[in-house]
Amino acid sequence: MTGREIPDFVYDPPDVPLSILYEDRHLIVVDKPAGLLSVPGKLEGRQDCLMARLQAERWDALLVHRLDCDTSGVMVFARTKAAQGFLGQEFEQRRAKKTYIARVAGRVEGDSGRIDLPLAADWPNRPRQMVSHDHGRPAVTDWQVIGREEGETRMRLSPLTGRSHQLRVHMLELGHPILGDPIYATGAARAYPRLMLHAETLSFHHPETGAWTSFAAPVPF
């Protein structure tokens, strides 16, 4: 296997308890573990997912957004159709704010910056995404260095758009792929037990009160 080849995906979801961070009559906030699909996969053997596990305990849970299978962290589910529609608009209109913690390969120079590179699907190499100035959709990520260790940098990433694999591709284009990324990292940077990317915080307006609410999940790495 060359560095750019994508290893065969073997779905082995973690056997861990459901972690509910908050719930009320309108929404449920959950800490998704790495390695668990947000929703059922299309192929056989990929029905186990956060959505199914949550609905087994909270029958009224409704999907609002997703996280990559390899990414851990905060997800919100609605409990009514009205809340689902409201929260969906929070994401679609970019009112919802998210921050992620990532460990990336190498020493990132500078303390903060912005990556503004349009992204498109790399169709011959799905599920890879790629930068495409001709066909890509706008994608913007703000980044901040929060720590440096030997051979790696810890960063806080704030996506201003919500493209597929946005943070993973933007970090790759910065020259610092996220450690443990089975799709975009190569060599030693790939040899980690998981993707070192975690959705740390999620903020949005509450569907009933309109109040600005924020939730956080502890970083597991």
Image (cartoon, rainbow, N blue to C red):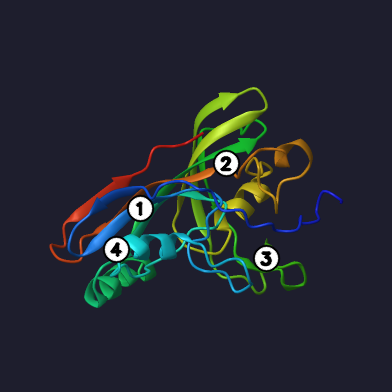
Q: Which residue has dot 3 on it? A: 127
- Whether residue 137 sits left or right of residue 5 in the image: it is left
Residue flagged by tag 2: what amino acid is it?
Met
At mark 4, the secondary structure is loop
Numbered circle sitting on residue 58: 4
Dot placed on the residue nearer the N-terminal end, 4 or 1:
1
- Whether residue 146 sits left or right of residue 164 in the image: it is left
At mark 1, the secondary structure is strand
Dot placed on the residue nearer the N-terminal end, 2 or 3:
3
At mark 3, the secondary structure is loop
Q: Which residue has dot 2 on it? A: 196
Q: Which residue has dot 1 on it? A: 30
**Residues at badges 4 and 3 in contact (C-beta under 8 Å)?**
no
Q: Which residue is at the far right?
A: 1
Q: Is residue 37 visible?
A: yes
Dot placed on the residue nearer the N-terminal end, 3 or 1:
1
Numbered circle sitting on residue 171: none
Q: Is residue 131 visible?
A: no
User: Percent from the top left, x then y, of residue 98?
Assistant: 39, 52
Q: Which residue is at the far top?
A: 150
C-alpha gap between disc 4 and disc 1: 12 Å
Dot placed on the residue nearer the N-terminal end, 1 or 2:
1
Observer-nearest of 163 and 206: 206
* In front: label 3 or label 1: 1
C-alpha gap between disc 4 and disc 3: 31 Å
Q: Residue 52 falls in which quadrant of the image?
A: bottom left
Dot placed on the residue nearer the N-terminal end, 4 or 3:
4
Residue flagged by tag 4: what amino acid is it?
Arg
C-alpha gap between disc 1 and disc 2: 19 Å
User: Percent from the top left, x then y, of residue 96?
Assistant: 33, 59
* In front: label 4 or label 1: 4
